[in-house]
Amino acid sequence: MLRSELIDTLHLENPHLTREDVERVVSVFFESITQTLEKGARVELRGFGAFSTRYRKARAGRNPRTGGDVFIPEKHVPFFRTGKELKARIDNTRKE
């Protein structure tokens, strides 16, 4: 699902809100998650999952095009762990 599809779906489910209001809510939601992760904190949405950051050490890599060695610096990357309820719903959907 694309961000625009999410906004359209929410707008159809909530006709009392304008599309601009729905866009603003979605933007604030994602911006709040982003700002929290920037601070190094964790965002947990019960039943859905948790967003956090993980540290990756510097390492040597390989450029697949040239085959040459490449240095990959250390960095923090976003990480998402699915919640138990979401896992169960997806698993039940796939079985049917």
Image (cartoon, rainbow, N blue to C red):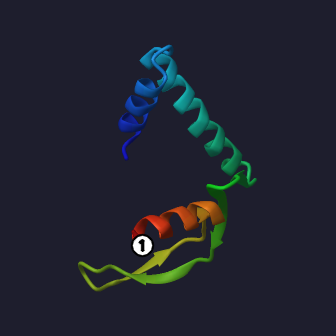
> x%, y% of residue 45?
68, 50
Q: Is residue 81 above or below residue 28?
A: below
Count neighbours of disc 1 (C-alpha within 10 A) and say few if under 14, some if 14 to 19, many if 20 or more.
few
Q: Quadrant of the C terminus?
A: bottom left
**In-front residue for pair 37/10:** 10
Q: What residue do we see at 42% from left, 73% from top?
A: 95
**In-front residue for pair 34/64:** 34
- Asked whether residue 83 appears in the rendered view, the answer is no
**In-front residue for pair 55/49:** 49
Q: Quick check: 19 left or right of 52?
A: left
- Asked whether residue 50 appears in the rendered view, the answer is yes
Q: Quick check: 63 left or right of 45?
A: left
**In-front residue for pair 52/39:** 52
Residue sitting farthest toward the left: 65
> x%, y% of residue 74?
60, 71
Q: Quick check: 3 left or right of 57?
A: left
> x%, y% of residue 6?
42, 37
Q: Is residue 22 above or below residue 58?
A: above
Residue 78 found in image quarter: bottom right
Count of numbered badges drawn on the protein: 1
Residue 86 found in image quarter: bottom right
Q: What residue do we see at 67% from left, 59% from top?
A: 52
Residue under label 1: 95
Q: Mark 1 is on which residue type?
A: Lys
Q: What residue do we see at 66% from left, 70% from top?
A: 55
